Amino acid sequence: QAKARRTGELKAIYTADKKVAAAEEQVQKAQLVTVKVDNPDVLRQIEALKGIKEMIIALGSALSEDYTEISPTVWVHKTAKIAPTAYIGAPAIIGAETEVRHCAFIRGSALVGEKCVVGNSTELKNVILFDGVQVPHYNYVGDSILGYKAHMAAGVITSNVKSDKTNVCIRTEDGRIETGLRKLGALVGDFVEIGCNTVLNPGTVIGRNTMVYPLSRVRGMIPAGHIYKSETEIVLKK
């Protein structure tokens, strides 16, 4: 009886090991799944970020007299307010009625629209900010695009590089979209509200009119018109 019991235990262990191995294999296969980028909007934004420096220089050279080139390839609209302690690296365009507050650090390759707020100790690099965007308090926005009137509350940052330094992929329900970029922060839609101290992981895409709770860790593609409460609780806005 003891021998039979021992044999049964070994069979159970062997079966469990096989199930674990099979599960691990499925996870590995899922991680390797790649889907073709067939979302035109996402594709356009990725391509814009790849050529953002050249795009800003081309746009800047064609701007009206309402813009002043305050330093080589840095154009600022005459109605924009730039704090004396702010830094704006080249190339950059700062739109009409935009406010760049004290100690803002714009490292370069920044296209900032009209009536935006770039706040105290906020850092921008390789970004497009559409009109009305607010990044007002201690934000880091790198290799990202923020849509019309998107708002980041205090302390929100875009993480733009993976820990293993491999190219960033955008996670979707159907697999992974290969971007070809080692640095990619977030693609954020119009009217998105992101709560305080949230981290947007590399390759995050947030649809328009979506809200994100404070202290969230967001990754993948979040649909438009939803409320992101946690990774396991994303509900439709009522």
Image (cartoon, rainbow, N blue to C red):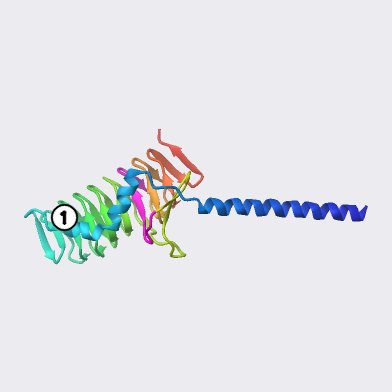
| x 43%, y 65%: residue | 165
Decide whether residue 190 is among the magenta residues.
Answer: yes
Q: Choose top left, top right, bottom left or bottom right for residue 103.
A: bottom left
Q: What stretch is highlighted in magenta?
A: 179-194
How would you rate the neighbour count of disc 1 (Cα within 10 Å): few for under 14, some for 14-19, many for 20 or more? few
Residue 214 pos. (x, y %): 41, 50
- Residue 163 left/right relative to 14: left
Residue under label 1, please give it: 59
| x 34%, y 41%: residue | 208
Residue 166 pos. (x, y %): 44, 63
| x 38%, y 54%: residue | 179
Decide whether residue 186 is among the magenta residues.
Answer: yes
Is any part of residue 162 visible from this angle?
A: yes
Is any part of residue 201 visible from this angle?
A: no
Residue farthest front in this picture: 36
Q: Quadrant of the C terminus?
A: top left
Principal SS element in the magenta part?
Answer: loop
Instruction: Give SS at disc 1.
Output: helix
Residue 40 pos. (x, y %): 33, 44
Relative to the observer, which residue lies in front, 8 or 83?
A: 8
- The three-letter code of the residue at mark 1 reads Leu
- Residue 204 left/right relative to 67: right
Relative to the observer, which residue lies in front, 84 or 12?
A: 12
Residue 199 pos. (x, y %): 41, 55
Residue farthest top in this picture: 238
| x 46%, y 64%: residue | 163
